[in-house]
Image (tube, rainbow, N blue to C red):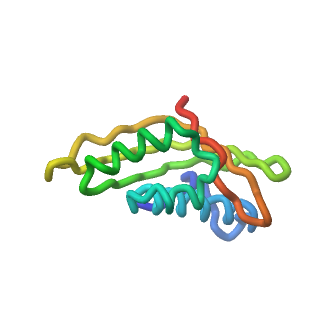
Amino acid sequence: MANAKPPDNFNPVSISPEKKAIFTALDHYREAYESESLDELQKIWPNMNKNQKKALKSAFESAQAVKVQLDCGDPSVSGDGATVKCQQSVRYTVSGKVQPSQTDSVDIVLNRTNGNWLVKTVRAN
């Protein structure tokens, strides 16, 4: 599944609007990453640091395609902040060849700003 995947015990009927908005933000992050556009990625992840921008720019320049899969747990929400533990798999196509997936356990930290959830940080575990 390409979308940000809720946990296996996820019941869509009982999801709070807040958690639904968080999963929507994670899906926007995934879509922006796959678009290979730093501008699109910065819309959902405005606090990306210089090193992250440089690494992503380099990866996007060498790749013809990027596929991202997020398998995420239940968000931990506190006020206007949330943390989601995810397995993030990224697969690049370089020189016409699909590369092996790079899978990492990550904590995606989000902040709610003006009613919208945005990625604050993505930390590998």
Assign the N terminus to one quadrant of the image: bottom left
Q: Is residue 1 visible?
A: no
In the figure, residue 25 lies in which quadrant? bottom right
As drawn, the residue found furthest toward the left would be: 96
Rendering coords of residue 65 (x, y %):
28, 56
Residue in the foreground of this view, choosing between 23 and 36: 36
Total marks shown come to: 0
Q: Is residue 7 in view from this perspective?
A: yes
Query: Residue at (33%, 54%) from the top-left corner?
Result: 66
Q: Quadrant of the C terminus?
A: top right
Residue 53 position, x and y percent, is 48, 44
Direction top: furthest residue? 125
Q: Nearer the viewer, residue 102 or 7?
A: 102
- Establish if 48 lies above or below 36: above
Q: Is residue 58 left or right of residue 76?
A: left
Residue 69 falls left or right of residue 47:
left
**Picture residue at 66% right of the left edge, 59% below the top:** 22
Position above or below: 12 against 55: below
Residue 90 is situated, as x and y percent measured from the top left of the image, at 37, 46
Name the residue rendered at 85%, 51% in the picture.
79
Q: Which residue appears farthest toward the right when viewing the image?
A: 79
> 43 left or right of 102?
right
Residue placed at 54% from the left, 53% from the top? 8
